[in-house]
Image: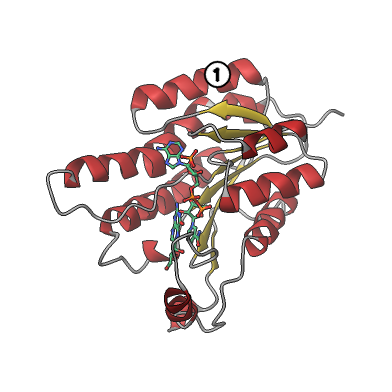
Amino acid sequence: MSQSPILVTGGAQRLGRHCVERLLDDGQPVIMSYRRERESLEALRRRGAVTLAADFSSEAGIHDFIARLKAQTSSLRAIVHNASDWAPDSLDDDAGANFERLFRVHMQAPYLINLHARELLDACQEPQRDIIHMTDYVSQKGSRKHAAYAATKAGLDNLTLSFAAMYAPDIQVNAIAPALIMLGEGDDEAYAEKAKAKSLMAKVPGPGVIYQTLRYLLDNDFVTGAILPVDGGRHLR
Ligand SMILES: NC(=O)C1=CN([C@@H]2O[C@H](COP(=O)(O)OP(=O)(O)OC[C@H]3O[C@@H](n4cnc5c(N)ncnc54)[C@H](OP(=O)(O)O)[C@@H]3O)[C@@H](O)[C@H]2O)C=CC1
Ligand SMILES: Nc1nc2c(c(=O)[nH]1)N=C([C@H](O)[C@@H](O)CO)CN2
């Protein structure tokens, strides 16, 4: 039986790219979305990843991506909603536009893709079909500086519960809720030390722990509606 591809949105860098590479290592066909073309995409293309441009900052952009996704494949094994923008709150006239951008990428895109790509998951002939939402520990706690980000990630957590109930038993729908996994390019040692201290495990684990969690969900046919924390015990600090 030929394998249906797994869609990873925002797969061009960091956690998404790591998961794309590990899925390819496992012999899994992958379709990945990217927003900005870059040289590093060529290496993934050479490994067989199918890359589709996507900008989820408008509803039209989301529907345009869905149409190109349906033209690309007739089935999907899973969808990983990884695309995200960790934008801080804007304190000026851009506050509303910033909130809207985060709503679209974190909530409207997963919502519309889940609705319109269900037929692709249903067409998968393999025993299991999954939707995985990448959310965030801050969904449960809020954030003083990233309130719009946290709120829209909380909305994605809630969509996990709704789609799990809507799509059972044919499609499992779960979320992975990380805390600090990878530092940003501009983060200095002082930031890193302060960030490490926020979790009980006191480390920045790197993207391998996310692929382990993704693999667990893809290989388990009895988990749905779960929001799995991968936060080093930060919720207990
Ligand atoms: N890194 C961490 O420590 C943590 C990550 N998470 C979550 O894990 C996931 C992966 O994190 P990380 O790898 O750091 O993510 P990134 O910040 O690297 O973003 C992933 C990708 O999302 C794409 N993207 C952003 N906005 C849009 C948009 N409007 N339309 C289409 N694509 C878009 C970007 O594409 P491009 O680069 O092409 O512009 C980017 O490559 C995210 O959902 C994040 O919220 C949660 C907690 C901690
Ligand atoms: N899309 C992104 N979301 C998040 C990122 C990121 O780099 N891109 N980073 C974080 C931080 O690591 C945060 O967890 C530190 O406390 C959160 N979300």
Residue 184 visible = yes
- Kindly identify the residue that appears in the image at 67 percent across and 56 percent down: 211
The amino acid type, in three-letter code, at marker 1 is: Arg
| Observer-nearest of 71 and 219 | 71
Image x and y of residue 168, in percent: 58, 42
- Is the residue at mark 1 in contact range of ligand 1, meaning its CB lies under 8 Å from it? no
Image position, residue 195 (x, y; %): 45, 76
| Viewer-closest of 164 and 111 | 111
Report the front residue among 31 and 166: 31
Q: Quadrant of residue 9?
A: top right
Picture layout, residue 100 above or below residue 160: above
- Residue under pointer 1: 68
Label 1, residues with CA under 10 Å away: few <14, some 14-19, many ≥20: few
- Give the residue drawn at x 80%, y 46%: 25
Would residue 48 be visible to someone looking at this image?
no
Residue furthest to the top: 71
Q: Residue at x 87, y 29 (%)?
A: 1
Above or below 206: residue 75: above
Instruction: Give the residue displayed 64% in from the left and 31% down from the top.
Output: 121
Residue ranking furthest to the left: 93
Left or right, 174 with respect to 101, comes to right
**Secondary structure beneath disc 1?**
helix
Q: How is the image coloured?
A: secondary structure
- Spot occupied by residue 4 in the image (x, y as percentages of width and height): 74, 30
Picture coordinates of residue 93, whole percent (x, y): 12, 44
Name the quadrant of the C terminus. bottom left
